[in-house]
Image (tube, helix red, strand yellow):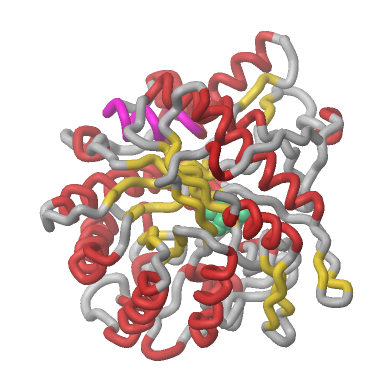
Amino acid sequence: MSTMTVSRDHFPQDFKWGVATSAFQIEGAHDRDGKGPSIWDTFCAVDGKIADASNGHVACEHYERWSDDVELISRIGVNAYRFSMSWPRVQPDGQGAWNEAGFAFYDQLISALAQRGIELHLTLNHWDLPQSLQDQGGWVNREVCAHFTRYATEVARRFGHRVHSICTHNEPWVIAILGYEQGIFAPGIQSRKQAMQAVHHLLLSHGMALQAMRGLGLATAMGIVLNLSPIYPASDNPQDVAKAKLDDGLILRLYMDALFKGFYPQDVIEHLGADAPLVQPGDLATIAQPNDFLGVNYYTRNFSSCGNPWDVASTGNTVTDMGWEVYPQGLTELLCRLHADYQPLRLWVTENGAAFKDQLVNGVVDDVQRLAYIRDHIAATHAAMAQGVPVGAYFAWSLMDNFEWASGYAKRFGLVHVDFETQQRTFKNSALWYQNFLSEK
Ligand code: FCB
């Protein structure tokens, strides 16, 4: 483990320092005050889909405890908070009537954070699609793009002037590939063809929503968040090298080329053959809207191999509780590459963090590995900035332990520990470290 050190004063004054969460992972209150079911509510009810057979019914009870959680955020000393709105909470069917009680929840949350001088970064879709839209095909049905655009426009009309940024989608690759091709995330479908159509509709709806929201004349920054990582061939074998190029195409270039260059990469489209998405004339021009920021979620690097799966232990680096190698240099490399190849106006690290097995002993969680992870990735962010990459934000994932999707509550990413029996929150040492880092001007 390296021990690079940076301090806050190495970064510009206006750098955004944050923590991130998402609605389904923390809110609970799955059917309260008129909220409709999301695809994750449905998916959790299917036997065997969630490792600990849990669901989001209670989660961190953030829907009730939001005011205490605002205090936690404020105590850490961040100047920015990234959160998501639950679409089925504010529009139970994903079309038609708005749910005023749902909007009222976000209204009070936004006010409380703004009063503490914390910038709001709102994500419209962090995976919890209204179930009624899934009943009509979800992201595979082109009509979802118009529904999403109406939802985005309504949210921007109501809250756009009170939030610093709006992100359309969090990690379209995860939504489409894990949800519609591998079936390990909601909605649990296994079809590459459907997954690729979902990719296209996620990107198209991003472009449509951006166009519509821009029409409101707001100063709010608008963009998208992708999960990205550098991909290396597992060996010098030409087949592994070719596989790494294709995987980079499937994970990074398919999204980045479309969003920033207005085309899908030819090698990927050829590889997909009959599974390539149906694209209508004008779609790619709609997708390639100017973005005020590109959000990058980075956790680890990846290796591609045609033979045996890559053995993560072989690097000798620390491996997290998710089985992900700790590799901060990959973040520097990724940010430099995105800047060189695509020149987004601004890059924000919108998620970065690690799950480790924590132990709460006498009120203390001595999470040295998480602390080192965050510290070294902040240093890696700085290293990219030192090479001229316009990075403007770093958000740690996550504010607190929460519902980690198919892993349930067993994987803990929080800077703040949550006892899911009592809902008690306890600062881990990583949170105390971040607090201290942020207080050094
Ligand atoms: C990302 C998700 C986030 C969280 C982290 C660990 O893919 O955006 O919700 O689950 O992984």
Which quarter of the figure has residue 89? bottom left
Where ligand 1 lies, by quadrant? bottom right
Q: Which of 283 and 318 is in front in this view?
A: 318
Camera sees residue 147: no
On screen, 133 above or below 331? Answer: below
Residue 427 screen position, x and y as percent:
70, 69
For the residue pair 103 and 99, the one nearer the viewer reads as: 103
| Residue 116: x %, y % from top left | 42, 71
Residue beneath the point at 37% across and 36% down: 346
Residue lying at the far bottom in this picture: please name it.
Answer: 33
49 horizontally vs 294: left or right: right
Report the residue at 62% width, 72% height from top.
Answer: 46
Q: How many marks?
A: 0
In the rendering, at what x and y percent does residue 139 appear?
37, 55
Magenta part mainly helix, strand or loop? helix
For the N terminus, the quadrant is top right
Left or right, residue 4 beside residue 251: right
The residue at 37%/44% (across/down) is: 197
Q: Which residue sits at x=67%, y=19%?
A: 233
Splitting the image into 4 quarters, where does residue 121 fall? bottom left
- Tell me if residue 257 is in the magenta stretch: yes
Compared to residue 237, the image places residue 437 above or below, namely below
Residue 433 vertical placement versus 360 (above, below): above
Decide which of 192, 412 is in the foreground and name it.
412
Asked if residue 70 lies in the magenta stretch, the reply is no
Q: Where is residue 332 in the image (x, y as percent from the top left)?
A: 58, 29
Q: Does residue 305 appear in this view?
A: yes
- Residue lying at the far front of the rendered structure: 441
| 161 sits to left or right of 411 | left
Q: What stretch is highlighted in magenta?
A: 252-262
